[in-house]
Image (cartoon, helix red, strand yellow):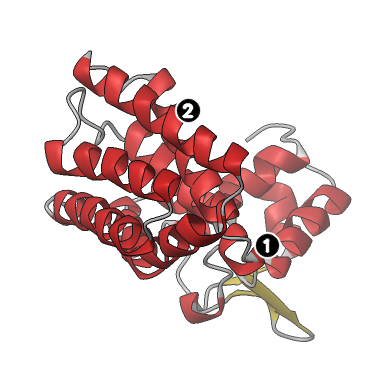
Amino acid sequence: MVQASHDSVLDHLGRRIAGGELVPGTVLTLADLEAEYGVSRTVVREAVRVLEAKAMLSSKRRVGITVSPMSRWSMLDPELIRWRLTSSARARQIVALTELRLAVEPIAARLAALRASEDQRAEIGRLADELRRLGAEHQGDSEEYLAADIAFHDVLLRAGGNLMLTAIQSPIAEVITGRHTAGLTPAEPVHQALHNHVEAAAAIVRGDADAAERHVRGYVEAILDEVRSVPE
């Protein structure tokens, strides 16, 4: 790589680690990275610093820069998720994040039904109608559908007023985008998933917490069944 920038060094090195090319325990040196990427020591140090902040690398005197065990990585970091979604770990990453969605989104929907503002209820209803329209037009794999889907889940997570739930907006947006980019979002959405999106929105609009939780669980389970069937 000739005269790479900080961003390109960070992105390339991050992908190599996230995808398993550089396995945990691999020792790197600033000098080797500087020569490999054709950049200054300052650029290499900055890329390493960012990866250390994500706990993907650790530096020790007389040892060097070492790739950390995955158990230490900041697995909800959006950039790390993007790297894994473009690596051989893509299928495992999508399943893991969908399992996380199953753990938190039904409760987020329950809280949204109880706490959402009138504007948030209206927005959730509007976005559900948009998803239904696009799905009926076989545009489930379109950029327009992707944008509406991400916006729907953003509002859902915000509407409950729990900042811990709001904090996972970015990871969920990344996995939705990753499915789309990988061509795993069908033009005609899975009926059960789309139906439950629409019914969950209706339940939130009318303040029915039990129904909101049930329907969100229904669509995440449908998505999980779908992504678990994708070969690695």
Residue 25 image position (x, y, % from top left): 52, 79
Can you identify the residue that label 2 sits on? 147
Residue 164 position in % (x across, y down): 61, 68
Q: Vertical placement of 141 versus 77: above or below?
A: above
| Amino acid marked by disc 1 | Leu
Question: In this rendering, does residue 183 appear at all?
Answer: yes
| Residue drawn at the location 56% of the way across and 79% of the way down | 72
Mark before the other along the chain sequence, 1 or 2? 1
Given residues 150 and 38, the one toward you in this image is 150
Residue for badge 1: 51
> From this viewpoint, which residue is outermost toward the front?
206
Q: Give the crowd class for mark 2: few <14, some 14-19, many >=20 residues within 10 Å.
A: some
Q: Which is more foreground, mark 1 or mark 2?
A: 2
Residue 139 x, y percent position in the rendering = 27, 17
Which residue sits at x=71%, y=49%?
A: 35
Most distant residue in the right direction: 42
Residue at the image position 52 percent from the left and 34 percent from the top: 122
Disc 1 to disc 2, C-alpha distance: 29 Å
**Residue 147: % across, % down:** 47, 28
Residue 140 visible somewhere in the drawing: no
Foreground residue, 192 or 43? 192
Q: Secondary structure at mark 1?
A: helix
